[in-house]
Image (spheres, helix red, strand yellow):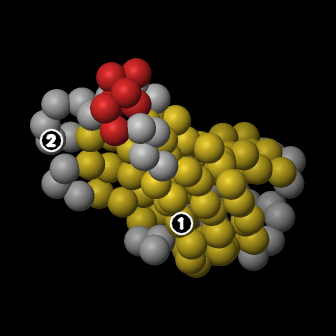
Amino acid sequence: MVRFCEAKLLDLNAIDLLIHEFSPAFRDALRIQIRNGKFTSQYWTLYIVGPPPGDYIWTTKRQKLILDRKAFRKGDVIKGRIDFECVEENADPRLVESYGRNPTTIKVKGVFQTIVE
């Protein structure tokens, strides 16, 4: 579920969206860069509590982004819908040997609205 979203205008044709979730133990984040009408996505998890869990690989399986319009300026309200899915897998050789790759599906789906900074 999309709960937090920030938007930053990088230049005339580029916007950075950061969709994130905070908890006391970790922070999940999905960064979407929109440039000239096309977008790329990057997902990661930052562990705040406890020892680092090892290395992970995130593989994007599905991504769809719909925005309410094509051009934005600072101070504009940006609205949209995201449908993103990736698979998280262990990449640390010690963990893979003990537990396998242990794939986990992560889905980020919902609507968002925020002000472009």
Q: Can the viewer see residue 87? A: yes
Q: Residue furthest left?
A: 50
| Whole-number angstrom distance, CA of label 1 to CA of label 2 | 23 Å
The residue beneath circle 2 is: 49
Q: Crowdedness of circle 2 by 10 Å Cα count: few (<14), some, many (20+)? A: few
Q: How many marks?
A: 2
Counting from the top left corner in percent of width and height, residue 112 is at 55, 73
What is the three-letter code of the residue carrying label 2?
Val
Counting from the top left corner in percent of width and height, residue 26 is at 26, 48
Counting from the top left corner in percent of width and height, residue 39 is at 76, 50
The circle on residue 108 is: 1
Q: Quadrant of residue 46?
A: top left
| Front residue of this view, candidates 71 and 110 | 110
Q: Is residue 69 above or below residue 94?
A: below
N-term mark: 1 or 2: 2
Counting from the top left corner in percent of width and height, residue 104 is at 46, 54
Quadrant including the N terminus: bottom left
The circle on residue 94 is: none
| Front residue of this view, candidates 73 and 15 | 15
